[in-house]
Amino acid sequence: MKVALPQNLENYVADLVNTSGYKGPDEVVLEALREHQLRRQGRSMEMTPELEQLLDEGLKNLDQAKTTDQLRRG
């Protein structure tokens, strides 16, 4: 697999390899992907009928939209 990075991220990876004990760029990317995977594991969402109804209502009333914090407070 080949990955193209913007220059600023390529420089960042190179700096990490030079200063943080990584053996190469692939170790930096592997660690970053593992951390990303762990963060995302707890974020799966199930579409329940109640959530679907709320989303439909929200789309119909975009001019009266509320933030999730406002909805939680009632």
Image (cartoon, rainbow, N blue to C red):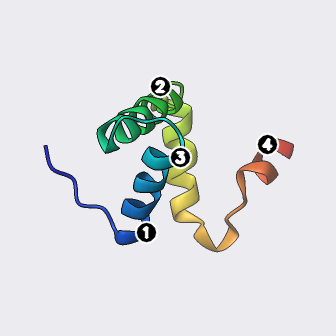
Q: Which residue is mark 1?
A: 8
- Callout 4 secondary element: helix
For the point 15% across and 50% down, which residue is it? Answer: 2
Give the distance between the C-alpha atoms of the residues marked 1 and 2, in whole angstroms: 28 Å
Image quarter of residue 72: top right
Which quarter shows the C terminus? top right
Q: Which amino acid, by three-letter code, is at mark 1?
A: Asn
Q: Nearer the viewer, mark 1 or mark 2?
A: 1
- N-terminal of the two: label 2 or label 3? 3
Query: How packed is label 1: few (under 14 Cα within 10 Å), some, or many (20 or more)?
Result: few
Q: Residue 50: x percent and y percent?
A: 56, 33
Q: Which mark is residue 31?
A: none
Give the distance between the C-alpha atoms of the residues marked 4 and 3, in whole angstroms: 45 Å
- Callout 3 secondary element: helix
Q: Residue 12: x percent and y percent?
A: 46, 58
Give the distance between the C-alpha atoms of the residues marked 1 and 3, in whole angstroms: 16 Å
Q: Nearer the viewer, mark 1 or mark 3?
A: 3
Please say if the residues under marks 1 and 2 sit with CB atoms less than 8 Å apart: no
Image quarter of residue 33: top left
Image quarter of residue 9: bottom left
Q: Residue 26: x percent and y percent?
A: 30, 39
Q: Nearer the viewer, residue 11 or 60?
A: 11
Q: Which mark is residue 41?
A: 2
Give the distance between the C-alpha atoms of the residues marked 2 and 3, in whole angstroms: 30 Å
51 shown above or below 14: above
2 shown above or below 21: below
Q: Which residue is mark 4?
A: 72
Q: Which amino acid, by three-letter code, is at mark 4?
A: Arg
Q: Which mark is residue 19?
A: 3
